[in-house]
Image (cartoon, coloured by chain):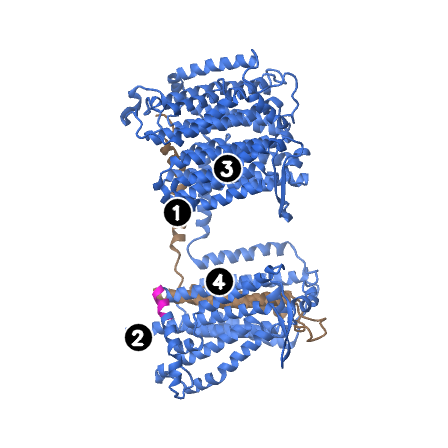
Amino acid sequence: MSPNIALVLVAATLIGTGVYLLLARSIVRALVGFLLMGNGINILFMVSSGPAGEVPILGHGDGDRMADPIPQALVLTAIVITLAMVAFVLSLAHRAWQLGRDDLLEDDEESVRIHRRAEENDLSDESRDDADVIAAEFAEEDE
Amino acid sequence: MLALVVAHAVAALLAPVLVRFLGTRAFVPLAVVPAVTAGYAAWQFPRVDTDAPPLEQFGWVESLNLTLTFRMDTLAWLMTLIVSGVGALVLLYCAHYFDDRERSKGLGLFAGSLTAFAGAMLGLVTTDDMLLLYVFWELTTILSYLLIGYVMTSRASVAAAKQALLVTTFGGLAMLVGLIMIGQTQGTYRISEILADPGSGTYLTWGVVLLLVGAVTKSALIPFHFWLPGAMAAPTPVSAYLHAAAMVKAGVYLVARFAPAYADLPAWRYTVVVLGAGTLLLGGYRSLRQYDLKLLLAYGTISQLGFITLLVGYGTHGATLAGLGMLLAHSLFKSCLFLTVGTVEHATGTRDIRRLSGVGARMPWLTAAAAVASLSMAGLPPVLGFVGKEAALHALLHPAGGWWSFDGVMLLAVASGSVITFGYTARFMWGAFARKDPVLAGDAGQVTTVAHHPEYLLVTVPVVLALAGLALGPLSPVLEDLLARHTSVFPAGEDPAHLALWSGLTPALGLSVVIWVLGGLLFLGSAPVAAVQRRLQLPYDAGRSYQHLVRGVDRLALEVTGGFQRGSLPTLLAIILLVLVALPTVVLVRGVTWPSGVRWFDTPAQVGVALVIVVAAIATTRARRRLRAVFLASVTGYGTALLFLLHGAPDLALTQVLVETVTLVVFVLVLRRLSGRFPDDPSVLTRRLRGLLGLATGLVVAAVALTAAAVRTHEPSAKGLIETAKEYGGGNNIVNVILVDVRAWDTMGELSVVLAAATGVTSLIFLKQDAVIRARRALRHTWRNRTTVEEEGTTRWIAAAPQLDPSRRSTIFEVVTRIVFHTIMLWSVYLLFSGHNAPGGGFAAGLVAGLALALRYLAGRGYELRVALPVMPGLLLGGGLFIAGASAILPMFLGSPPLRTWVVDVPLPLIGDVHLVTSLLFDIGVYLVVIGLMLDILRSLGSALDDQITEEEAG
């Protein structure tokens, strides 16, 4: 199957620019990047579904050169999900704005703590002492 | 047999309710289920003892070869009697062991788990399907976790439960791999068929070894024995059942089950027999120095499990007979002794050997029961334990390879183990019941009296168990006959071993006498022995190694998590994207097929649209103002819609245009609250790094798209759909038929996602319950006043007119809204109904209706929205999902697969035949969910934010 270069270029551009924006610290900017990526990925479905054709509705043509309907069904649900996702992420951005008067992503404190513990080799976790805990419960050995 | 397993499950589910109403008495009806099971098994014996034992078979997951197959042969029969008989007695014991006050502390869950455990054990020992065996095996693991961790507040209990869970699950997974290796090699998962044709080969041998790993972990053989003493944190009835009669016997059962097939494999012999002998000695050795009665029994159990595994895995007639005898004897005497300890602790408050003194005289019945059980454990006549041990010695006294062979060493190990067993048994009786020197107790003080006399079941149950062992001593020849069908798999040979109290003055009897004398000496010389043990530190401790391993895994997890997860989301995303770039790049560099020919474009218009999209996308990255970025992004969105249209996808184009429009509205609604410019202003270096990653991702995606197209060989899978869409789906629009019929389950999933997102939006905006209640009240108020306002008869373009601030009104907008709203709604309904045959469908129709609602909202704010659609969005979302779900399930009531579509022509007067397709119902569900999402967005991000802004301006 020979791919459509124009569509490939559009998809690659949308995904590349989407990645650039997705890495931003502003939630809204990252969301815009996500939208660009989403459009790019949907176009990739068109690339992989073969050449353009007649609309996949019976009775609208001879039916031989019909565009592949399955990728279309996949993309259709993706489009609607994207809308739900936009609404949700914007609510998140709004909540961030309510709390801190901007929509910047702060560093996650829990992850920072884990990273620090890894650097300090701090293993003061509960599972560490299981054997001691059990032994203490039973006074296992005769002292 | 399946019915009995199901009965256990039902009883387990009812247990919490029973406990709530009956308190601890609930254990009595629960005990009936295993009791009936044991009775049924006993009654079935004539059918069991034939060449074709009772067999039940039901299909389950045919594609996995997983069937519900149960088969009660002699071994399964014996195991059923043990797990159900002891199970019933232990449940009875629980009725007096626990206190009604524990009802609120999860006693219901405990009772349910214990009953379910009995059912899982029953299934485990009776199933003839290896995969089902694994299912029951893991069920016992999980239930034992709940039972050991019953005292959730005690850290020791939780830690012990976790340790047991980790070790036995590890073994279980190894066993699963082994079972699959055996099953795939032999082409069957039926145990009886494997036994008939065991097969051979290196691959199969590895499967058998993995199978044994499961048995070894479950039965607490070295090097996995350490979890069993820890599990003594469980309530004593659990120890009596799981750690004496049932769960630990699962491993023994597995060895006994597969021994006829694989006992002659060297790998089997050295794993089972050597580990068994080692465990026998190590467990006994450690048991000798315990001061906690329960721990003493726990190490004794480890030792006995080693002994029994050695016997049943030995693969000779005599050893197997002795092993089965010991299996039964051990279940009876060890659960009796555990329950005795439970009663002693219940009555005195301690189980420390040093503190208990002279308690025996105060509980004569209990002491007598423990004494009989101890005879069995030490191997003294006239009880079953003696008979079993005697048979074992007899069987081993004929070493095939002479005295200086493997068999000879095993005899020595068994004899030494028996000496130690005698020693710790004496220590147990002395420790629990004898009068002792007060010095031993130290500062803690002796306990010589019984604080409260035990209730009758706490004594009766151990007595019954002890009596069973006592009765089976003289009756052992009968037992031998009953087991003959299993033991006769192995040739009896000359001078076969028998189960009997008296076999004459045999060498085995002489050896027994020597063992008793040495054992007695071991107990009497306990002080010097203890001194030696103290000085002699074992060089290796399996429990410690396990802890090192667990700590190592923790360490690894910490390093990996800490290495990647630095707290910054952009960094984390960059790592993910780097992997996305790196892995395909490796493949691309190593060489792939590139397309032999390409098409530059399908139509010239495509090139024009593509150019606009590329320019807009690049401009979006440079935008510093939020609205500019959003508008540029939507240019790419509308452009994408045009590309869809040019490609031959009108449904996509329509939906994309609608979604793009709604997205713009949503963005504007939220962005009015945020700053005009983006708050982040990354450094040049950051921007360059991001740009580089974006460029790399784009290039890799393009390369993958090209090569994926090049290697495609198959015809599109939609070919068949074109013929069947009309016939089965009843529609011309194939995309719509796919959505509501062919892939309708996926669409159900999408609807659930939409529902979850809408719920998330609501909770993020409304935050508190009272805000929702206020919204609901406003809705009710609007609903009530709607008619009265209209009756006033004043001419208004929209309903909210009197409520609005005149300076913010736009009459033209109100007029337009008034004129087009109903038209748009009509169009939406048209799209819904025509979608099956033309572009449209539930998604597009719902979005159109949502846009109409958005128009009403923009014209008259929240009040207008409430008038336009006076329901909570939740009703539409939930109702839509319900309708979609109902249309999926309805065909099942008519005996068809779910989501089956029917085409019906309904004749209507004047109109003619109306062509109805049942999947329209599903599409109506989709329609309602989408409208619900739109209403939710407008209400939350629209009118709720309006209210917040008004409040802030006022206050």
**Residue receiving disc 4:** B690
Q: Is residue B765 visible?
A: yes
Labelled disc at residue B314: none
Question: In the picture, residue B395 is in which quadrant?
Answer: top right
Q: Is residue B773 magenta?
A: yes
Residue type pointed to by label 4: Arg
**Residue receiving disc 2:** B953
Q: Is most of the magenta stretch helix, strand or loop?
A: helix
What is the spatial separation of the Cα atoms under label 3 and label 4, in whole angstroms? 66 Å
Q: Nearer the viewer, mark 2 or mark 3?
A: 3
What is the spatial separation of the Cα atoms under label 2 and label 4, in whole angstroms? 40 Å
Question: In the picture, residue B842 is in which quadrant?
Answer: bottom right
Labelled disc at residue A117: 1
Q: Chain of mark 2?
A: B
Residue type pointed to by label 1: Arg
Question: In the picture, residue B191 is in which quadrant?
Answer: top right
Provide the letter of the chain coloured blue: B
Label 1 sits on a secondary structure element that is helix
Confirm whether circles 2 and 3 share one chain. Answer: yes
- Residue B475 on image: x %, y %: 54, 22
Front-lying residue, B427 or B760: B427
Confirm whether circles 1 and 2 share one chain. Answer: no
Label 2 sits on a secondary structure element that is helix
**Callout 4: 10 Å neighbours few (<14), some, many (20+)?**
many
Closer to the chain start, of discs 3 and 4, is: 3
- Residue B180 on image: x %, y %: 62, 41
**Callout 1: 10 Å neighbours few (<14), some, many (20+)?**
some
Confirm whether circles 3 and 4 share one chain. Answer: yes
Q: Is residue B429 magenta?
A: no
Against B720, residue B104 (above or below) is: above
Proximity of marks 3 and 1: CB atoms separated by less than 8 Å? no
User: Which range is magenta?
Assistant: B769-775
